[in-house]
Image (cartoon, rainbow, N blue to C red):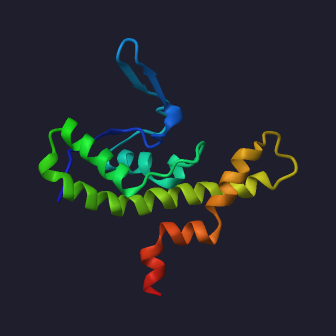
Amino acid sequence: MQILPKSIVNTEVNSGNFIIDDKNNNYYLIDWEKPLITTPLQDLSHFSVPTTTLWKTDYRMNEKDRSDFINTYCKKRKLLNHFEDIKKALNTFDKYSVMRGLSWSAMAWIKYQKEDRLLKNEDTFKKMDSYLKIDFIKDIFNDIFEMH
């Protein structure tokens, strides 16, 4: 079942890719280097998973914030009658979004180990390293780990 019509998605919807002009009530999503035509659920998921929210902050969306976020999205899109379907679909998308963040972190973590790497950021390395810890991964995928 297709809940939402396909649209152009950014694929890297994180806080650093927004320009907010409160004075003129204008909001821009920038950095369109990898756009796709697919369901907007991909961007909604990417925006709210821990590998995105924790990237440059210490914020991790709790269940109430996540539910409020989805509810606000549904209200704005006039999709409140699809709230539960969207929430359920996002739970599936989230696993893929987090895996994308983890696999990127693993690739970058390895590149950071090379002595000839010119650009290194200690905070970035620490964040990637924290994402690759088994406790972080178990916490994200607790339903899978509980099955075994």
Q: What is the x, y in percent for residue 68?
A: 30, 47
Q: Quadrant of the N terminus?
A: bottom left
- Measuring 58% from the left and 43% from the top, which residue is drawn there? 57
Horizontally, residue 122 falls left or right of residue 3, namely: right
In the displayed structure, would residue 132 be above or below residue 27? below
In the displayed structure, would residue 15 be above or below residue 19? below
Query: Given the current orientation, which residue lies at the most extreme bottom position?
Result: 148
Q: What is the x, y in percent for residue 144?
A: 44, 77
Q: What is the x, y in percent for residue 10?
A: 41, 38
- Measuring 64% from the left and 64% from the top, which residue is drawn there? 132
Query: Given the current orientation, which residue lies at the most extreme right position?
Result: 115
Horizontally, residue 55 falls left or right of residue 144, namely: right
Q: Nearer the viewer, residue 36 or 42?
A: 42
Query: Given the current orientation, which residue lies at the most extreme left position?
Result: 81
**Residue 106 in view, yes or no:** no
Q: What is the x, y in percent for residue 14?
A: 49, 40
Displayed quadrant of residue 134? bottom right
Query: Given the current orientation, which residue lies at the most extreme top position?
Result: 24
Displayed quadrant of residue 86? bottom left
Horizontally, residue 8 falls left or right of residue 104, namely: left
In the displayed structure, would residue 84 be above or below residue 139? above
The tally of labels here is 0
**Residue 66 in view, yes or no:** yes
- Measuring 43% from the left and 45% from the top, which residue is drawn there? 47
Horizontally, residue 50 falls left or right of residue 62, namely: right
- Measuring 49% from the left and 52% from the top, which residue is drawn there? 60
